[in-house]
Image (cartoon, rainbow, N blue to C red):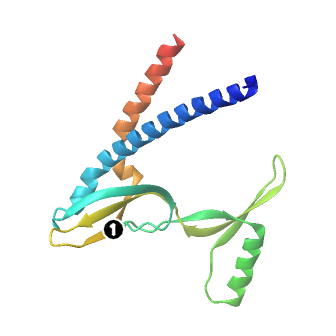
Amino acid sequence: MSKITKKIFEDYKYSNKILKNYKISHHKNIDKIIEILNPYIDEKYTKDPCNHKITGFDFLNDNEYKIKELSVEYDWIKISEKEYYSICRDNQKFSFKTEIKYDCIFEPDYDEIYYKKGIKSREYLRVYVNEWWSYGGNDNVSYDFLLTEVMDEQYLRKEKLKRLEIINERNW
């Protein structure tokens, strides 16, 4: 075998080893997140006793959340010039009015930024749960949690401090 093919095989084996380690650490992190979420999911099942298991979760940032007690907040969203003028025409034709505005920026270069008022996107976590009953049957449901409610800030600060300590030890 030539030196080039040996080098390619060695690099391939090395990258597979790194990939395997990353997959293992990824699954450990998923397990940690599921441990954090278990008490929140258990609260949902206090009145309705059935077996349940968290099957997955997604981190989302949009306005499709299913949190009922959450008030809807509006925010200014950037849009293109074409969309801005399209909304202007629609506002003139139809009775509904979409709030729009534009800002002119003069420094360093002249620029116009267009906005419309829309529902504020929020960071939340959607948790998928499989539930089943002793008399037969199962169902898949999902619950939404705001990240600020689920993630404890003290825990996050502790993790950041540990990382800073490790970095500080390496530098000394």
Q: Amino acid at mark 1?
A: Val
Specify the farthest residue to the top: 172
Rendered view: 31 above or below 57: above
Disc 1 secondary structure class: strand
Rendered view: 2 above or below 100: above
Q: Is residue 108 left or right of residue 147?
A: right
Asked if one can make out residue 152 in the rendered structure from this viewpoint, the answer is no
Rendered view: 58 above or below 155: below
Q: Nearer the viewer, residue 156 or 69?
A: 156
x then y, percent, for residue 14? 58, 29
* Residue lying at 82% horizontally and 46% vertically, measured from the top left: 108
Q: Is residue 117 left or right of residue 102?
A: left
x then y, percent, for residue 81? 77, 68
Q: Quadrant of residue 117?
A: bottom right
Asked if one can make out residue 161 in the rendered structure from this viewpoint, the answer is yes
Q: Is residue 97 left or right of residue 119?
A: right
* Residue lying at 66% horizontally and 89% vertically, measured from the top left: 94
Q: Nearer the viewer, residue 131 or 89?
A: 131
* Residue lying at 15% horizontally and 72% vertically, measured from the top left: 135
Q: Quadrant of the N terminus?
A: top right
